[in-house]
Image (tube, rainbow, N blue to C red):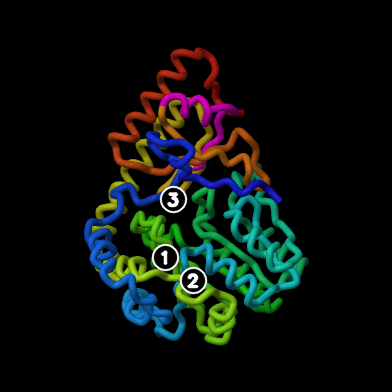
Amino acid sequence: MTEQVHGGDVYRHPDVIDFSSNMNPLGTPESVMRAAQESMCRIANYPDVRCERLIRALGDAEQVPQEWLICGNGAAELIFALAFALRPKKALLPAPTFAEYEQALRAAGSEICFYELSHENNLQADVGLAEAIRREKPEMVFLCNPNNPTGLLISQAVMEEVRSVCRQERSFLVMDECFLDFVEGGEQLSQKKHLADQKLFILRAFTKRYAMAGLRLGYGICADESVLERMRAAMQPWSVSIPAQAAGEAALQEKEYIQRSMQIVRTEREFLRSVLEECGFKVYNSVANYLFFRAPAGLREALLKRGIMIRSCANYRNLGEEYYRIAVRKHEDNIKLQAALGALAGKEEGKWQKQS
């Protein structure tokens, strides 16, 4: 099991510019903070264990029946709840991908098989993924689209093949779409339209979309209501706090905020891509609000000394210490990263050589 290390550790590294955590570059909307603050006058009460108001708003926003929705204390709680509710004997994961899937499955006692994404194919999911599902016959498959940490989308052709094989093998497919909010045309790429005809669970969260990781609010969509009931039985009651529920309702009204953040992500992602490529680093074709790249080992530590924190991806399966991820931030922060990389290249001449 690889070490559980994540981005966003500002507690051990205060006063840094944090490129390690993939939040919305606009920061938390004022309306969301205000709703959470105003809800504090009600904290003498238990939270609504059913999250009825939030579920109603989510049903309208997602255009799905309210009975298909479940809320949790961040997407992580739902990942663990699903693993414990269904307890698959065998599960399949691509590598690299988000570490919590493996952690939850191991805690639930599942055997895990891995499909290592090919470095020759730039870690892009291919038809070999579907072939691995057919060969291994797992009871559960976790996929992240776009993938974390690479930011790469699964092509529609591969996705169709994966769905078909999962249906044939009766594998329960879990689609983590938490970063699809930052992808152009992401709603059309969602697997929601297959909920009624597939053993499928879609995972989403407010965390990245509205920069509210500290409030912990995620949700899932599944047409099989018996699965949701088993998940609720595996979860603690009142896991979604009053401030989190109020903040979630307010966030769903922030339409203009989402449009502005999409524009910033698109523009600044390309700016950061050019910065990294000018350093000679290999940059992958991320479509999310972060960039994955290959650079010399030690880059994270060198940047930390200059007050900038990036995400080392060394603890991901199938990756090494030369792989990194950076969030797309506002232009003034991105300029500071550019300056820090430039200073390092100038001070340590010859260090930043193009990757083979």
| Placement of 245 over or under 321, stated as above or below | below
- The question of residue 26 being in magenta is answered with no
- Mark 1, mark 3: which one is toward the viewer? 1
Q: Which residue is mark 1?
A: 217
- What are the residue bounds of the magenta stretch? 292-306
Residue at 39 percent of width and 50 percent of height: 23
Q: Position of residue 100 (x, y in %)?
A: 59, 58
Label 3 crowd (10 A; few <14 / some 14-19 / many >=20): many
Pick the front one: 341 or 71 = 71
Residue at 53 percent of width and 62 percent of height: 76
| Placement of 231 over or under 33, stated as above or below | below
- The question of residue 302 being in magenta is answered with yes
Q: Which residue is mark 3?
A: 287
Q: CA distance from mark 1 to mark 3?
A: 24 Å
- Mark 1, mark 2: which one is toward the viewer? 1
Identify the residue at the far front of this view.
44
Q: Amino acid at mark 1?
A: Leu
Q: CA distance from mark 1 to mark 2?
A: 21 Å
| Among numbered discs 1 and 2, the one appearing first in the sequence | 2
Residue at 65 percent of width and 58 percent of height: 103
Q: Which residue is mark 2?
A: 191
Q: Position of residue 92 (x, y in %)?
A: 69, 63
Q: Amino acid at mark 3?
A: Val
Q: Position of residue 285 (x, y in %)?
A: 48, 45
Residue at 35 percent of width and 76 percent of height: 45
